[in-house]
Image (cartoon, grey):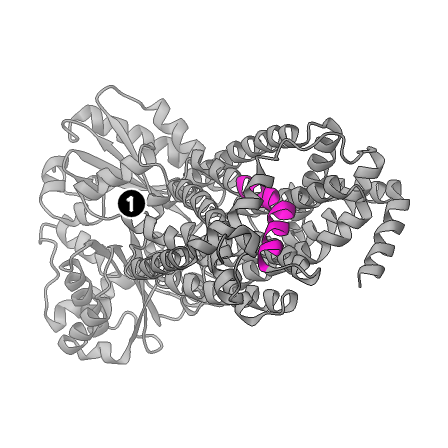
Amino acid sequence: MARHLDAFFRRLLAVPWVVVALYALLLPLAVLLALRVESDHGIDRLIVPSDPEFRATRAFQRVFPERPAVLLAAEAADPFAPAVQEVLARVQERLRASGMDTFSALDLLRAAPPGTGLRALVTGTDLFRRQGLAGPGFLAIAVTLPEDRDRGLALLEDALGAASRPGVTWRRLGGPYVDAALERATERASLRAFPLFGLFVIGLVLFLYRSARTLAAILLTLAACVGLTVGVAAPVGWTFTIVSSLVPLTVLVTATSTLVYVHSRYLDGGDLAGALVNKFTPCTASIFAAAVGFAALAVSRIRPIREMGLWTATGLLLTWVVVFTLYPALVRVLRIPPRVRRPAAAFGFDRLADRLPAWSWRHRGALVGIALALCAAGAVALRGMRLQTDGLDYLDPGLPVVQDARWFERTVGLLDRTEVWVTTPAGAALDPRVLRGLDLFGRALEREPGVAGVIGPTTALRWMRYLGGGGDVLPDTPAAWAKAAGDLEALLLEQPALRGHVDVGSLSSARLTILGRSEGAPAVWAEAAQAEPALARCAMQRVGEGVLQAGIAAHLVPTLTESFFLTAAVIFVAFLLVFRSGAARVMAMLPSLVALLVTFLLMRLVGIPLNIATILIASTVLGASENDQIHFFYHFQEGRRAGGTTEQALRHTLRVAGRAIVLATVLNAGGFLALALSDLPPMRQFGMVSATAFLLSMAADFTALPAALWIVFRDRPDARRIPGS
């Protein structure tokens, strides 16, 4: 195989300009495709389409289609003052002129008996509070946005700016505001992380190799890797999400590390084709193992994680091709000579290579024991780690949209929305007994902890009764419910806005919207069905964003465990193909396991939760850190095959790969540490813990791994190095 590889690389190096020209044609196309990749942070896009809850939500939305909505809360010392009412009216008038639907207490005031005051109207019932239209110190406007969310939010800002008044503070609430903030924060995170990593790479390459031509070859290769990786997303249909910035960053880090391994070997040997052949097997094994490891994230039912895994795997395979084709061609085109100067990365590794083997033999028991004890502690810490799925937790707590949402939670209750889809026999949605059951069900839900209110088919009837002076509770007699069914049928014909809670086409579906969280809805439904037997002929299903968000929490831990075991199995198979010793295959994974499990221990100690970003730690750390172990073991076996002892093989490994392992680790840690400046708390946490994990893995490479090898091979240092042995 080495002969064939050598022939291939020498033929490639004979036509470097052809290779460079080919990439010069591909890259502009990749950039055009990359510009077409869309962003999508909607909660309903976080779950994969095959998920049963996702399919149920989509089916529900086909019956009850709706546009995104927000709540604008006007906070004032006296929200009922005429000046505040005037501001509310002006905002509604401007928004309606823009084509948006709005609803507030002022609309109900117009339907109230003449002479009714707004204060008396709002404080005479809890319906306003339960629907978020009023509360202590504020009145609110419910606004339905147009299909173009960003245009709608811009129109809202124009309306609020035109109607601004001293003493009135506007609170902006709702999912569209959160989604828009997530998109902006994600874009800023990418704009910060990549330039920082680029400057880091430039500085490190110049420091190591002191060659502008080497820097140019590496940067052009990295640009091709990232360009092709991002461009491939458009035809496949992948989108930018909260974790998608990890894709190009992972590709950048992996490509840079691989280039450091190859270029360092080129400087050591002086033969570019020989260096490519020597590093082809370990680099190929590590990149393919990492790619398949990230592809293992396809088991996740969380869409951004699944896409990120497949996207990263594709990017790593493209990186493998680019590194072994474009980079050597650029070295030839730019005429980069070997051994211009001794690399600045010596760091005393010759001295370390002489001393570390004997030191690791003397302390082999303690080093391996400490590593295993830390692994056990990390495994214990992983159990019961806090899960984080609230979209607000993915944003900086200092942002106005987060502060407004937290204010609303303290004042009224949770902003979460869960839809309840009730299917009835054909034509029975307006049956008086079914309506009675739905009303009983809704009022019982409002007594549940965490539920601010429930909006359903009978809510309009309660408003009518209240405005007519009869209170906000519907009378519970057969005759009254028969009349209520007739009134509701007339309202549905007269006011299309009310059709969002009854399917007027088939009259076989009804909808209730829970404001807040209610995990006990099925039990409440069962109790309501006992009180009203007509519900026994109906079926209830929880759907919507609230259910999907809860589903994300349910899928986080399975994503972690399944992807971890799949990634570990893939890496083990990669080691199986590269190395012969069965025990060595297991020991080779020890540094990565130590790094990963100790990272979980540190996360538990400092209170970092598992969320949509930190859940990727397992695949990222295993997929990236095993690169070092594969290079370590490849050269260790190289030394053993040359007839060397364990000590001689370790010294050979440290001299050939030791510096590159340190440099690759610094690149990995530095690249992901750039995420620590992100505006997104999960990405900041991911950047810090992943950088920590890479450093832990490197420490284990030079301590626990050599110690484990001494134990596995049952060898001793050379006699000349251990007096009296």
259 with respect to 542 (left or right):
right
317 with respect to 558 (left or right):
right
Q: Amino acid at mark 1?
A: Val
Work out whether residue 84 can be spotted. yes
Q: Is 43 a magenta residue?
A: no
Work out whether residue 299 can be spotted. no
| Residue 431: image location, x then y, percent | 25, 73
Which residue matches tag 1? 606
| Residue 399: image location, x then y, percent | 34, 33
Q: Dot 1, crowdedness within 10 Å: few (<14), some or many (≥20)?
A: few
Q: Quadrant of residue 121?
A: top left
| Residue 694: image location, x then y, percent | 48, 47
In this rendering, is residue 625 above or below 676? Answer: below
Q: Which residues are magenta?
A: 646-666
Query: Which residue is pictured at 26% across the width and 59% down the height?
Result: 456
Query: Which residue is pictured at 41% across the width and 45% down the height?
Result: 689
Of 403 and 508, nearer the camera is 403
Q: Residue furthest front?
A: 724
